[in-house]
Image: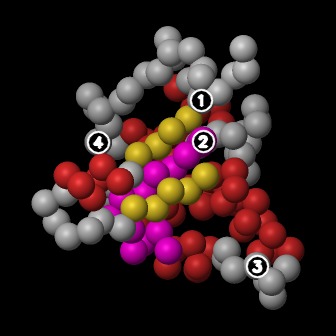
Amino acid sequence: LNAINTTSKKPMQKCLFLSIPALIRAMRNYIADPVTNEWSADYLHQVESGADLVVIDDLGAESASREATNFVQETIQNIYEDNQRIITTTNLSMDQLKSTYHGRLISRILEGSRGKMIDFGSVSDKRRLK
């Protein structure tokens, strides 16, 4: 994300990195205890709508091989509706994404992505221990 600011013709860009599993966990913690947790839907909207670029990391990990709940889908949908510049990472195939999320959200995720997708399927995972 630092490269965004070093190559930008605009002043400093506000870049927001959102790990979806961590975000959903934080929002569920807020629902359970709003006094000590700040990640309400309103707080998320305030934070992400002020960003020039949003990175949604690890999409699908929050749902672990089942259809995402309405809460998860609405949260992700709102991020896509509020932002124009989004980078999304996922370990899911397109078929897995389609079985996890509603068509409306998939359409929003893919909007404007033609020719801008990078498939790392043939790259070995560098995180695994040898």
Distance from the alpha carbon under mark 1 to that under mark 2? 7 Å
Would residue 48 be visible to someone looking at this image? Answer: yes
SS at mark 4 in the image: loop
Q: Circles 3 and 4: CB distance less than 8 Å?
A: no
SS at mark 2 in the image: strand
Earlier in the chain: of badge 3 and badge 4, it is 3
Earlier in the chain: of badge 3 and badge 2, it is 3
According to the picture, the residue beneath numbered tag 3 turns out to be: 37
Q: Is residue 43 left or right of residue 86?
A: right
Distance from the alpha carbon under mark 3 to that under mark 4? 35 Å
SS at mark 1 in the image: loop
According to the picture, the residue beneath numbered tag 4 turns out to be: 112
Measuring 36% from the left and 59% from the top, which residue is drawn there? 53
Earlier in the chain: of badge 3 and badge 1, it is 3
Residue 61: quadrant of the picture: top right
Q: In the displayed orientation, state which residue is furthest to the front.
A: 130
Q: Circles 4 and 1: CB distance less than 8 Å?
A: no
Per the rendered image, the range of residues in magenta is 47-59
Q: Is residue 120 left or right of residue 35?
A: left
What amino acid does circle 3 point to? Asn
Earlier in the chain: of badge 4 and badge 1, it is 1
Measuring 49% from the left and 79% from the top, which residue is drawn there? 46
In which quadrant of the rendered image does the C terminus lie?
A: top right
According to the picture, the residue beneath numbered tag 1 turns out to be: 91
According to the picture, the residue beneath numbered tag 2 turns out to be: 58
Would residue 80 be visible to someone looking at this image? Answer: no
